[in-house]
Image (cartoon, rainbow, N blue to C red):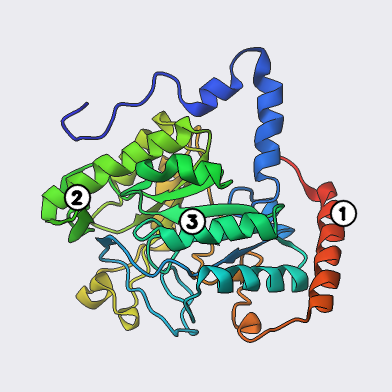
Amino acid sequence: MPASGIPSPSPRNACATACSGGGATAASESLEARVARHPCYSAKAHKAFARMHVPVAPACNIQCNYCNRKYDCSNESRPGVTSTRLTPAEAVRKVLTVAARLPQLSVVGIAGPGDPLAKPDAVFETLERLRAALPDITPCLSTNGLVLADYVERLKALGVGHVTITINATDPDVAERIYPWVYAEGKRHEGRAGAAVLLERQFAGLRAAVAAGMLVKVNSVMIPGINDEHLVAVNRAITARGVFMHNIMPLISDPAHGTPFGLAGQREPTAQELEGLRARCAGPVKLMRHCRKCRADAIGLLGEDRHAEFANVSLSVEEMEVGLKRREKYLRYAQGFEGAP
């Protein structure tokens, strides 16, 4: 293992393995099927299919300088905020309600407001209930990756085939400026030592997820003067390890949000700086350009958020049945829109 603690890449990444030899056509078709209805993994799918985030993960095991989780918040549209926290039973009931009213719903994600794997019992229960109640839905999960390697097999058994990991650095000297501390194995690790623990575990989780056949998307937050140039190295590292997609997101640092970076005056990147970085990262790994930086309780097509519309919706059994049948018809009809990612 290199001195940085990040595992070396496999000789052949997942894309090379899938696309080599006589199985290239079948592998390509399988990949298209896996992303055809996932609006985050396919720029085409986000025009016809909707996603829903269920906020069942209240706790986090790291501190990010760009994050401030807020509850009972309906006015901010950014990761980490939600208007409510749900139990697994409440979450699945709400998914069924949304599916009955929103036939385009194809994906249910768990992305906060904390990290889904910091206290995973509620997440696993939600996934189990969701699989029983709506087996045709695509479940996915977004994590900081600190303990992902410990749970990959269980997530896969519960039907999770799409995982997003937020990775902002490969160098602990860079990462310690982003993460004040991480909590691992019953201990709080601060500064560079904590950053090194996080990076090692993030790449272990990435490697385990790719080896398990999951489609991995990496989110990276572009922070001017801290990791903006370094993200080219991050892109190279994740490309070598078989990541499917890289989403380079601009820092959100409005002081009104109360994040450490926002309160310290850390500036956001300009649109030109963001596009310049994306251009430098162009290569084998697809770059996501249609991200809308969703809330932890987002509902609807990307680019629209209808969470407030569903805040107090309650359907009768008959209304639920009629709505879910309408959704089935829509999904069959929408097959004509499915295509390459």
* Residue marked by disc 3: 124
Name the N-terminal-most of marks 3 and 2. Answer: 3
Q: Determine the residue positioned at 37% across, 34% down.
A: 236
In the displayed structure, 24 sits above or below 177; it is above
- Which amino acid type is marked by label 1? Tyr
When asked about the image quadrant of residue 314, the answer is bottom right
Whole-Å distance between the Cαs marked 3 and 2? 27 Å
- Which amino acid type is marked by label 2? Ala
Name the N-terminal-most of marks 2 and 1. Answer: 2
The answer to the question of whether label 3 and label 2 lie on touching residues, with beta carbons closer than 8 A, is no
Whole-Å distance between the Cαs marked 2 and 1? 48 Å
* Residue marked by disc 1: 333
Give SS at disc 3.
Answer: helix
- Which amino acid type is marked by label 3? Phe
10 Å neighbourhood of mark 1: few (<14), some, or many (≥20)? few
Return the x and y of residue 234 as percentages of the image width and height: 33, 41
| Residue at the extreme top | 21
Residue 89 or 113: which is nearer the viewer? Answer: 89
Whole-Å distance between the Cαs marked 1 and 3? 32 Å
Return the x and y of residue 305 as percentages of the image width and height: 60, 74
Q: Determine the residue positioned at 85% across, 66% down.
A: 326
Does residue 250 appear anywhere in the picture?
Answer: yes
- Asked if residue 339 lies left or right of residue 72, the reply is right
Return the x and y of residue 23 as percentages of the image width and height: 66, 18
Q: Quadrant of the C terminus?
A: top right
* Residue marked by disc 2: 195
